[in-house]
Image (cartoon, helix red, strand yellow):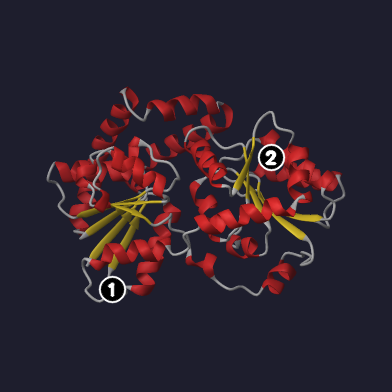
Amino acid sequence: MVLMVVGHIAAAKSIKNYITENYPEVEIESIDCIEYINKYINKISTEAYKEMAKKTPHLWEKIYTKSNDGTLAKLSTTSNKIMAIKLKNLIKKEKPDLIISTHPFSSQMCAYLKKKNKINCKLATIMTDFHIHNQWLYLPEFIDYFFVSNSNMKQDMINQNIPENKIFVTGIPVSQRFQENFDLDDIYDEFWLDKNKFTILFFGGGEFGLGRDTAYMTLKAIIRLLRDVQVVVVSGKNKKMNKNFNELVDKTNSTDRIKVLEYTEKIPELMSISDCVVTKAGGLTITESLTSHLPIIIINPIPGQEEENAEFLVNSGCSIWIKKDDNIARIIKNIYRHPEILEKMKKSSISLAKPNATKEICDILLAEFYDDI
């Protein structure tokens, strides 16, 4: 059996790793479809999104909202039809039995190719957010499986006349490392942390950032108000944010309790020793946090899909969303001084977590080809 995974890199990687480890007889290839089709387009579109999300987030919100239907939706699907031509050539070369899409664009391309009888394999779409958007649902009659993160999404899709037997509430796939049993003492030692202190994991940067002012002021409030708390700040690829955070830590003489990291592959380890996480509302980080049973404090989500994610999480009880006009210091202090709030949020995280999402998705998809599952 030949299988292709196309789309969102992290989710696709989780699927590929699980199948490689558990189904060695399956030939699998993972493709970043936009990068494969045109590296220049990928770079331009990524940079445009990055700049818009950071500098004009409300413009991005309008584009996101309008792309749910109307002219922008047609423009998106039309451009994807054009780009699908090159993807078709790869699919014909590889001859997969099944294609798993973890990005709406790749899902659109494959559905279009199937409609035109250019491909005839099974198609599966894994949605990597907590709210549906119609970009995921282009030509749904040609998609054989939909995997979603929660039952609300399933009901919304049923309301749009998508057959219930196509929709599976599995959660979003993340690395199996988030289920490992780590030696916690080793992790505390590695990062020079005190195992007796309350620990916050703070995602302050990343490729798109959180918004300089909100992230900076939130960390500043934590340093000033919560002197017996330690924080691991992950700035990712955001060099400017990393510089600002390090300057803040030096200025406040808090190097003993604030650890600023750049990119790290040890997020599962860090989540295993954390008491809560501060982050924007990206689908993958949120899923990792839920899998690690962490209360989530959301700051500055990007308008559109991240705000929809944030709203879902707040309504589910596992998250607090710090908004523009909120008193950051008061909210942070109130959460810490009332551990029952965090405990309630943790219980909600546990109830939402779907740690076996990757396994469940793979087993459902491969059950048709293997009788012994």
Where is residue 354 drawn, in percent x and y?
46, 60
- In the picture, the disc for residue 361 is none
Judge left or right: residue 115 versus residue 306: left
Furthest-right residue in this view: 253
- Image quadrant where residue 54 sits: top right
Judge left or right: residue 37 versus residue 344: left
Q: Looking at numbered disc 1 in the image, what kind of residue is underneath it?
A: Ile
Task: Measure the alpha-carbon separation of dots 2 and 1.
Answer: 46 Å
Q: Is residue 34 visible?
A: no
Judge left or right: residue 136 versus residue 49: left
Pointer 1 residue: 373
First-in-chain label (2 vs 1): 2
- Viewer-proximal residue among 82 and 115: 115
Q: What residue lies at 79% left-to-right and 55% top-to-bottom?
A: 229
- Image quadrant where residue 111 sits: top left
Q: What residue lies at 48% left-to-right and 63% top-to-bottom?
A: 355
- Viewer-proximal residue among 356 and 316: 316
Where is residue 91 drawn, in percent x and y?
22, 53
Split into 4 quadrants, where in the image is the C terminus? bottom left
Secondary structure of the residue carrying tag 1 is loop
Q: What residue lies at 55% left-to-right and 26% top-to-bottom?
A: 56
Rate crowding at label 1 as few (under 14), some (14 to 19) or many (20 or more) other CA atoms within 10 Å: few
Split into 4 quadrants, where in the image is the N terminus? bottom left
- Asked if 55 appears above or below 249 in the picture, the reply is above
Rate crowding at label 2 as few (under 14), some (14 to 19) or many (20 or more) other CA atoms within 10 Å: many
Q: Looking at numbered disc 2 in the image, what kind of residue is underneath it?
A: Ala
Where is residue 23 drawn, in percent x and y?
32, 73
Q: What residue lies at 61% left-to-right and 73% top-to-bottom?
A: 182
- In the picture, the disc for residue 215 is 2
Secondary structure of the residue carrying tag 2 is helix
Judge left or right: residue 265 versus residue 145: right
Disc 2 to disc 1: CB gap under 8 Å: no
